[in-house]
Image (cartoon, grey):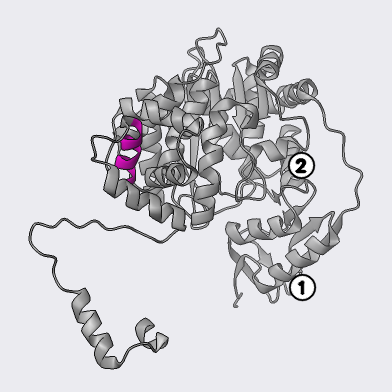
């Protein structure tokens, strides 16, 4: 069809050409397949890798890079040289991109450990002087999942050190750092992080000023642009950052949902095991938990709305999100159980609940906010629009991907006050004209754009009510 549309050859000539394309190669000739589906530069790098990866005259470092591009596995010694070289930009942009893409396409468990080692032991580790330094991380992709901002003050109120460094949102409406930035300064350097943790037992900061995020600054735009699966790479990335930050004991949330990074429970279980295996290999104690991500965790999507949900939980507000409360207590309990004086989940859960209900966690959060540098409330005009139910029914499902996309159209996470405020949850009955959710922004044009998108595809799956 493609050849015919060009109108350069007769049907007979096209048939002859297609027949020739299927002829076998002469005996003794090897063939290599080059996937030319991305940029021209990446295609050229893949061609160079095939031609040069086995030449003895090629520099060993360059040869290792080409070997990986060709799909071969590398050992720890190779990665210990390659990872710093990538960060120091010793290769061409196209070669470095092609290598990182290859690392998202095929990595063995041993290679993931090797990458974690290379990232971990090429940077100085923060020394806290404690035998237990804890942390909590989520793979994200679930709307309103700001559990970390509740967990950190609970743990810090107990007395364990929990230095939390987080990324900003890449594809979602808000990340942990974006949400915390509504309340406090997050762009702290190493010295500021250490001072905050020593004063309050915890911090919630952006990792952008820390050197070990430079490699992710290189790979994140690639995975986003080309839609690549970087989950295995992320295991090495996340754990190496935790190690460098001085953590010794970590809990990992691996949420799964059709709209999340991890789609199925089986994939989540496999990834949880990988986190624990790689963590053990680099000297960390890691517990990873697959969690169901089909239900929203908080009602707000966007930095300010998610910060509101967090503060409601910490303040024991009757309007607080129950899923956010319960999930926060679950992860706080597992972290507290790392302490030998507590020792098990049940005792940790009761202690976490007590620290929350007594107001100790809220007081600790206020101390962390004040030390990092409190951000005053913004006095800006907020425009709002409601998205309502087209008919009577019951909410069966909320598509987190669509809702998050609508929040981004409102301006989140750059506009801190922009986002989506859910009014209904799965299982709720609604009548025609009743609000499903509210969208808001400080930019009227963005709000109107988001509203048009919402009207086309609301993100809510409804079932009609029958008698």
Instruction: Give the residue at x 70% y 14%.
Output: 195
Is residue 404 shown left or right of residue 44? right
Residue 163, percent across and down? 61, 22
Q: Position of residue 356 (x, y in %)?
A: 68, 28
Kindly identify the residue that appears in the image at 39 percent across and 89 percent down: 7
Q: Position of residue 228 (x, y in %)?
A: 45, 52
Other residues around mark 2 within 10 Å, as few (<14) / some (14–19) / many (≥20): some
| Segment tinted magenta in the rendering | 61-70
Q: Judge by depth and name the residue closer to the eye, 125 or 54.
A: 54
Asked where in the image residue 130 lies, by quadrant, the reply is: top right
Decide: is 403 above or below 262: below
Along the horizontal axis of the image, is 46 left or right of 135?
left
**Which structural element holds mark 1?**
loop
Name the dominant secondary structure of the magenta segment: helix
| Visible residue check, residue 353 | no
Q: Is residue 62 magenta?
A: yes
What residue did someone put label 1 on?
433
Sequence-wise, the earlier of marks 2 and 1 is 2
Q: Nearer the viewer, mark 2 or mark 1?
A: 2
366 is within the stretch colored magenta: no
Q: Which mark is residue 302?
A: none
Q: Residue furthest top?
A: 129
Q: Is residue 202 above or below residue 227?
A: above
Question: In which quadrant will I find the N terminus?
Answer: bottom left
């Amino acid at each position: 069809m493609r050849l015919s549309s060009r109108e350069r050859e007769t049907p007979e000539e096209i048939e002859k050409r297609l027949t020739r394309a299927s002829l076998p190669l002469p005996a003794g000739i090897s063939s290599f397949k080059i996937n030319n589906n991305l940029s021209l530069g990446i295609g050229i790098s893949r061609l160079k890798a095939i031609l040069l990866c086995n030449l003895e005259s090629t520099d060993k470092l360059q040869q290792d890079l080409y070997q990986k591009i060709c799909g071969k596995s590398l050992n720890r010694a190779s990665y210990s040289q390659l990872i710093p070289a990538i960060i120091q930009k010793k290769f061409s942009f196209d070669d470095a991109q092609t290598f990182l893409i290859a690392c998202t396409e095929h990595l063995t468990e041993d290679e993931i450990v090797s990458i974690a080692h290379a990232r971990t032991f090429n940077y100085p580790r923060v020394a806290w002087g404690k035998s237990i330094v804890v942390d909590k991380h989520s793979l994200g992709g679930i709307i309103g999942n700001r559990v970390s901002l509740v967990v950190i003050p609970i743990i810090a109120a107990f007395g364990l050190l929990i230095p939390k460094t987080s990324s900003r949102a890449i594809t979602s409406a808000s990340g942990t750092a974006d949400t915390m930035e509504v309340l406090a300064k997050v762009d702290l350097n190493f010295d500021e992080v250490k001072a905050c943790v020593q004063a309050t037992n915890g911090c919630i900061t952006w990792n952008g000023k820390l050197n070990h995020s430079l490699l992710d600054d290189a790979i994140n735009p690639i995975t986003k642009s080309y839609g690549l699966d970087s989950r295995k790479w992320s295991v090495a990335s996340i754990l190496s950052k935790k190690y460098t930050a001085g953590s010794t004991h970590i809990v990992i949330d691996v949420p799964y949902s059709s709209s999340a990074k991890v789609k199925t429970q089986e994939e989540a279980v496999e990834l949880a095991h990988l986190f624990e295996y790689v963590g053990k290999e680099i000297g960390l104690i890691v517990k990873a938990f697959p969690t169901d991500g089909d239900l929203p965790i908080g009602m707000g999507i966007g930095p300010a709305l998610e910060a509101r949900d967090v503060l409601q939980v910490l303040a024991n507000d009757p309007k607080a999100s129950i899923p956010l409360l319960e999930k926060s207590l679950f992860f706080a309990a597992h972290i507290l159980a790392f302490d030998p004086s507590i020792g098990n989940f049940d005792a940790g859960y009761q202690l976490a609940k007590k620290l929350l209900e007594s107001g100790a966690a809220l007081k600790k959060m206020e101390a962390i906010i004040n030390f990092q540098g409190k951000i005053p409330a913004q006095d800006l005009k907020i425009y709002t629009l409601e998205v309502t139910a087209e008919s009577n029914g019951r909410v069966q499902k909320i598509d987190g991907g669509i809702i998050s996309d609508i929040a981004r159209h409102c301006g989140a996470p750059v506009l801190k006050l922009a986002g989506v405020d859910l009014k209904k949850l799965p299982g709720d009955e609604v009548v025609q004209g009743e609000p499903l959710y509210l969208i808001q922004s400080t930019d009227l044009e963005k709000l109107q754009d988001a509203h048009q998108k919402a009207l086309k595809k609301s993100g809510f799956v409804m079932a009609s009510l029958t008698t």
